[in-house]
Image (tube, grey):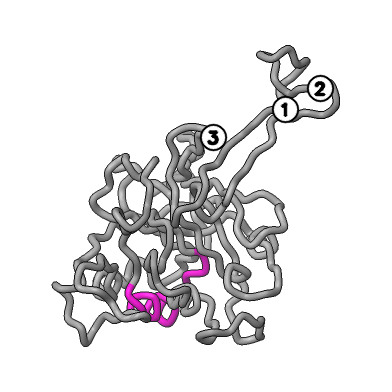
Amino acid sequence: MKVEVNLDNPPISIAIPLKFNGPQPNHFGAGAATTRPMKSGNFIGDTRQGGSCNADEITLNPHCNGTHTESISHVVDELIAPHEVVKQPLMPAYLLTVSPQQMSNLDNNKDTYLPPLNPEDMVLSKEVFTAVRENIHKNVKALIIRTLPNQETKLKQIYGASHQPPFFSNQAMHWLVKHTEIQHLLVDMPSVDRLYDDGVLSNHRIFWNIEPGSHQRSKKQYHHKTITEMIYVPDNIKDGRYLLSLQIPRLSLNAVPSNPLLYQLKG
């Protein structure tokens, strides 16, 4: 697929700036991301404390402390780092804004979840994707999801029992896997699954084609796919097609901090 990119405009980062030791998003009760000056013998890595230079040590949980990209190794035992998966970081992408719906307002026969949904759960239903299937059906390799409402509080939201984010229904995830060519899914929620789901991770498993309860790698699984969570897409960025640069470090982890960049297309 050939596309023309407008390089006159700088790319737009949809990563959340992570402010160490300051206000930052957090998920599932994890500790905050912090920094401290390196200490070694008489050396201290802080010029304010008399050091010759600044050198920080960091504490970070990629899954819970901001924008991150994860591989299938989030669920299976064998380590496949995200940088081993994203071999072509430039890819056609589509940005879609969706409105989560409360489970009590959905047709129970169309959208379900494992474990079972609660009436108050906010869900991204299959219908919101089938309604725009022509936009994401062909040649789109990355789907970027912006959920409404889209307040800037997402930049520092603490997700937990008192603030549970929306998530995909199992039918919505099944539809994306079966009817699109999406290899890289980017969402502004901290997880495509429910915050408290008894460890089932049913949507992660559907996306990567992992059998329920299994943590073993197999050939039928989709090792070429990634999930990026906790992005933030400002309101002034319009829905539509972009070229995505999924920037990730070469760290041998199952999830790494990432910086997705959107390039505008010509025409």
Q: Is residue 123 above or below residue 5?
A: below
Q: Residue at x 17, y 76 (%)?
A: 106
At a point 47% along the width and 62% down the height, the residue shown is: 142
Classify residue 240 as left or right of residue 245.
Answer: left
Query: The disc labelled 1 sits on which kind of residue?
Result: Ala
Q: Determine whether 105 is above or below 190 in the image.
A: below
Is residue 136 something that shows in the picture? Answer: yes
Which element carries disc 3, helix, strand or loop?
A: loop
Q: Provide the secondary structure element on which disc 2 rests.
A: strand
Q: What residue span does the magenta drawing correspond to?
A: 169-184
Spot occupied by residue 90 in the image (x, y as percentages of width and height) = 57, 54
Q: Which mark is residue 20?
A: 3
Measure the alpha-carbon separation of dots 3 and 1. Answer: 14 Å
Name the residue type under label 2.
Answer: Phe
Q: Badge 1: few (under 14), some or many (20 or more) residues near its Cα, within 10 Å?
A: some
Please tell me how crowded label 2 is: few (under 14), some (14-19), or many (20+) other residues with Cα within 10 Å: few
On screen, residue 72 above or below 159? below
Between 173 and 256, the residue placed more toward the observer is: 256
Asked if the residue under mark 2 is in contact with the one under mark 3, i.e. CB atoms within 8 Å, the reply is: no
Q: CA distance from mark 2 to mark 1?
A: 10 Å
Residue behind mark 1: 55
What is the number of the mark on residue 43?
Answer: 2
User: What kind of secondary structure does the magenta stretch mostly adopt?
Assistant: helix
**First in residue order: circle 3 vs circle 1:** 3
Residue 263 visible somewhere in the drawing: no
